[in-house]
Amino acid sequence: MRKNADGLGGFSVIDPGGNWIRFHRDAATAPMPATTPARRLAKALANAVVQADSRGSVGKAVRILDSALARPQADDDPVEQVEVLVYRAELAMVLHDPKTAAKMLARAQSVTLTGDESERAAPAFDNAAELAAALR
């Protein structure tokens, strides 16, 4: 469950009429949102999550992530790179594009991580494993 722009975790449901219904915790009982992500890839991921998960604009989310991935920078956090690649794979699955999903998952697996980074990236790799299983 990813957090949206307000820092609230939740999920969306689309009814047969195409209406989006967003479920989330009561803002009064939810933990305070973290500060806005400072790094480039974290910002791109946060913006893509808002576009795809909150607004249903999967195409916009894909463009955000593809743009960020096309311009790698030396100071990019490898964990954030893995998270972006795995989310991009998830969006590819939503768009019924298993070839791109597999490509993104392979790229995520090839990112070199330290031990600490591997621990931080564990949730993303758990999501990647579920996506990979769905590709089979």
Image (cartoon, rainbow, N blue to C red):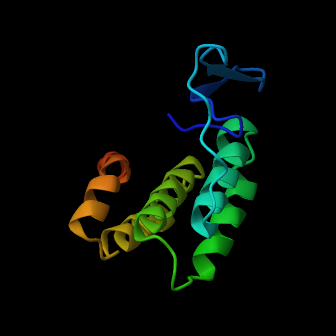
Q: In this view, does 89 lie above or below 5?
A: below
Residue 87 percent coordinates (x, y): 51, 54
18 to 123, vertically: above or below: above
Quarter location, residue 18:
top right
- Foreground: 86 or 8? 8
Residue 97 appears in the rendering:
no
Q: Taking 106 as reference, is 126 above or below it?
A: above
Q: Is residue 76 left or right of residue 59?
A: left
Q: Which of 90 and 3 is in front in this view?
A: 3
Residue 61 image-quadrant placement: bottom right
User: In this image, 86 relative to 67: left or right?
Assistant: left
Return the residue found at the far bottom: 74
Observer-nearest of 4 and 87: 4
Residue found 62% across the figure and 20% down from its top: 24
Q: In which quarter of the image is residue 23?
A: top right
Q: Where is residue 38 in the image (x, y as percent from the top left)?
A: 63, 61
Farthest-out residue, left: 115
Q: Please state which of residues 32 and 93 is positioned toward the viewer in this rendering.
A: 32
Residue 124 as seen in the image, left or right of residue 75: left
Residue in the image at 59% along x and 17% along y:
25
Q: Number of labelled discs?
A: 0
Examine the rendering and report whether any part of residue 17 can be seen. Answer: yes
- Horizontal and vertical percent position of residue 22: 68, 23
* Residue at image point 63% right, 68% down: 40
Left or right of 120 in this view: 48? right
Give the percent coordinates (x, y) of residue 56: 73, 40
The residue depicted at 34 percent of the width and 47 percent of the height is 123
